[in-house]
Image (spheres, rainbow, N blue to C red):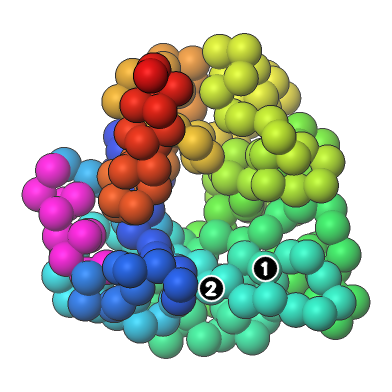
Amino acid sequence: MLNKIKGKLIVSCQALEDEPLYSDFIMGKMALAAARGGASAIRANSVVDIKAIKQEVSLPVIGLLKRDYPDSDVYITATMREVDELMAAEPEMIALDATLHQRPCGQTLAQMVETIRARYPQLMLMADIATVEEALYAEQLGFDCIGTTLHGYTAETRGHKLYDNDFAFLRAVLEVVNKPVIAEGNVNTPQMAARCLQLGAHAVVVGGAITRPQQITERFIEAIGSSL
């Protein structure tokens, strides 16, 4: 899978419950449109969405399952419960929060990775990180690839954008890890995606700029308003 996505675009097809496009049928069609446009893989949230997507396209899928827990702010594939549920849809790779934050039920990231490797030895793992320290730790734990997904979305990085200072965070991660690095997070234009690959990212994930028309519309409205 890593060879198939190298130097290419991954499209994130996700919609939350409070969004107009929340539907496994719609996410399946979004993935089909992305595939016809040339996407190399799909990133998707939930078992039903992944199953619907796999009925529409033959592209590999990076699966995840978002779920809130009262004792932790980790919500992307936070426990083995989510991993076991996702495996019913047979994604080629699973993404999980690989930050250093406390996980639900007191389980550590290292324990979770060890359990996954024992239970699903063929499954590939993507580490969603927010800091350079987390990227280094994810590599130490043996993740197959590292994504900049959570940079700007944790308490330590709130307000930061992946594209700040010509993708300074992406460049910092690339300098210290040997595992493939997947650029993800606020990659809003084709030019940004191309720049990530020029800098050395293994692949780039684009979501909202392609599959979330509500967000796209809001960016247009903001730009129009600021020009008046």
Identify the magenta region.
27-37
Q: Which type of secondary structure does the marked residue at label 2 adopt?
A: loop
Question: Horizontally, is 127 left or right of 138 in the view?
Answer: left
Which residue type does callout 1 highlight? Tyr
Q: Quadrant of residue 50?
A: bottom left
Q: Earlier in the sequence, mark 2 or mark 1?
A: 2
Q: Main secondary structure of the magenta part?
A: helix
Residue 20 x/y as whole percent: 33, 69
Q: Which residue corresponds to the image point at 87% horizontal and 65% vertical from the top-left?
A: 102
Q: Which type of secondary structure does the marked residue at label 1 adopt?
A: loop
Looking at the picture, does residue 133 appear above or below residue 26? above
Check residue 81 for magenta coloring: no
- The CA distance from mark 2 to mark 1 is 8 Å
Residue 118 shows up from this direction: no
Q: Which residue corresponds to the image point at 35% horizontal and 73% vertical from the top-left?
A: 22
Question: Horizontally, is 38 left or right of 114 in the view?
Answer: left
Which residue matches tag 2?
A: 65
Residue 51 x/y as whole percent: 29, 79
Residue 214 x/y as whole percent: 34, 52
Looking at the picture, does residue 165 appear above or below residue 151? above
Residue 131 x/y as whole percent: 76, 37
Q: Which of the pair 30/227 is nearer the observer?
A: 227
Q: Which of the pair 189/7 is nearer the observer?
A: 189
The residue carrying pointer 1 sits among few (fewer than 14), some (14 to 19) or many (20 or more) residues within 10 Å by Cα, namely some
Q: Which of the pair 192/178 is nearer the observer?
A: 192
Looking at the picture, does residue 8 appear above or below residue 138? above
Which residue matches tag 1?
A: 75
Q: Which of the pair 13/181 is nearer the observer?
A: 13
